[in-house]
């Protein structure tokens, strides 16, 4: 009898403990949900833009900041702080190392951020696998563009006829795209480096110093939209997603045949696939990251946002959600070291 009584008491205590644990779990969940819903109430969120004022990165970053706060719970204020340097590498280094990891400090960068980790690890001190990817609203298509009086009709014509391309430094796609094309296709192409950016190269084109450059189509839409509409430009090849503004232009991949060459071109396309990404530092709480991704997704569905991008940037949105962006980044960062080494040797980096 005593053993039976003891047994029942033991069962009762066990059931009581389980009940207490369930209540505690429900309470913790409720508190967690409440804190998530209230976290952004009356807070300020800072987006660090990895470029100076003006231009595609700063302009689109400010548009995103203005619309994102409309879709975050709690009516937070979203502000932009410019942190230029090294193609957004300086900003990403700071975000990775020093920024608050609670979802109140985010980064917005140029497309080359992930490629920089692969190509220049001594300079890029962050790991894209650990960053909290929120989404990208705009991807980028880069073209080798020349003036319409340039004596070639296709890129393959440049095997026999020299063309002169203006570029910035070797770390930029403005240099890397024509340099890669030159090496893989054995082109008679002279690349003049040292220009400060696409705008300065465009002036050099107008002065007759160079025939063209390898810049983003969105640059032409912003700076010389008439050149797109009046046929002032010829597009010889592109990397990135297809773009209706250049329907008959070949992808650089279509001009090579070996898998080795295609793998090297894939390295150039990393930035095109990532686009202009919004992301946070490592370690943002999962619920905060879900909230940020949901708000970003809702913003992308906001017709006023799409119109603002198209009006200001003269480009349609081409969005990537945070989960897909993370997959793209992790795939890029798994590129074999042998391919990266050969790409760097080929580009002289």
Image (tube, rainbow, N blue to C red):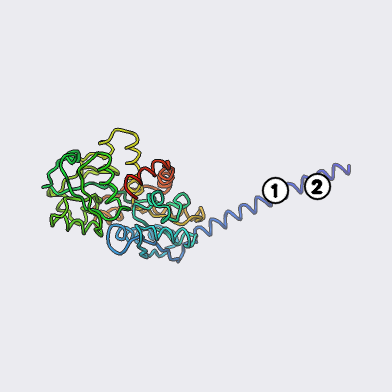
Relative placement, left or right, of 13 versus 195 is: right
> In the rendering, at what x and y percent does residue 25 appear?
62, 52
Q: Which mark is residue 222?
A: none
Q: Nearer the viewer, residue 36 or 344?
A: 344
Reply above or below: 4 against 122.
above
Q: Say what secondary structure mark 1 lies in.
A: helix
Q: Residue at x 50, y 54 (%)?
A: 287
Quadrant of residue 47 within the rendered picture = bottom left
**Is residue 301 visible to the viewer in this orientation of the structure?**
no
**Which residue is pictured at 31% across the width and 63% down the height?**
52
Q: Which residue is mark 2?
A: 9
Is residue 186 visible in the rendered image? The answer is yes
Q: Residue furthest left?
A: 149
Residue 27: image quadrant is bottom right
Q: Quadrant of the N terminus?
A: top right
Q: Residues within 10 Å of mark 1 (few under 14, many from 20)?
A: few
Drawn side of residue 228 relative to residue 197, left or right: left
Q: Position of residue 294 (x, y in %)?
A: 42, 52
The location of residue 166, given as percent across then percent down, is 21, 53
Residue 18, label in figure: 1
Front one among 200 and 284: 200
């Amino acid at each position: 009898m005593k053993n039976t009584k003891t047994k029942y008491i033991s069962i009762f205590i066990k059931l009581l403990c389980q009940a207490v644990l369930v209540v505690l779990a429900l309470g913790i969940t409720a508190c967690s949900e409440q804190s998530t819903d209230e976290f952004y109430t009356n807070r300020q969120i800072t987006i660090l833009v990895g470029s100076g004022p003006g231009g595609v990165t700063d302009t689109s970053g400010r548009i995103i900041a203005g619309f994102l706060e409309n879709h975050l719970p709690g009516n937070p204020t979203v502000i932009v702080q410019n942190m230029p340097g090294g193609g957004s590498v300086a900003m990403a280094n700071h975000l990775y190392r020093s920024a608050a990891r609670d979802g109140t400090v985010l980064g917005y960068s140029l497309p080359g951020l992930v490629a920089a980790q692969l190509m220049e690890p001594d300079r890029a001190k962050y790991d894209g696998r650990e960053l909290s990817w929120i989404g990208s609203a705009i991807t980028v298509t880069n073209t080798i563009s020349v003036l319409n009086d340039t004596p070639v009709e296709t890129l393959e014509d440049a095997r026999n006829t020299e063309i002169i391309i203006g570029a910035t430094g070797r770390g930029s796609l403005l240099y890397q795209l024509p340099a890669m094309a030159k090496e893989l296709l054995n082109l008679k192409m002279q690349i003049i480096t040292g220009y400060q950016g696409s705008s300065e190269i465009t002036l050099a084109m107008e002065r007759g110093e160079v025939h063209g450059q390898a810049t983003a189509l969105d640059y032409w839409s912003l700076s010389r939209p008439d050149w797109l509409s009046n046929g002032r430009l010829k597009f010889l090849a592109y990397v990135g997603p297809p773009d209706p503004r250049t329907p008959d232009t070949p992808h650089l991949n279509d001009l090579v045949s070996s898998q080795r060459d295609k793998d090297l071109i894939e390295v150039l396309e990393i930035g095109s696939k990532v686009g202009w990404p919004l992301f946070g530092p490592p370690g943002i709480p999962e619920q905060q990251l879900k909230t940020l991704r949901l708000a970003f997704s809702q913003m992308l569905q906001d017709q006023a946002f799409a119109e603002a991008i198209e009006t200001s940037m003269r480009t349609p949105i081409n969005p990537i959600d945070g989960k897909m962006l993370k997959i793209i980044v992790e795939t890029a960062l798994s590129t074999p070291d042998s391919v990266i080494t050969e790409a760097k040797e080929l580009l002289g980096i």
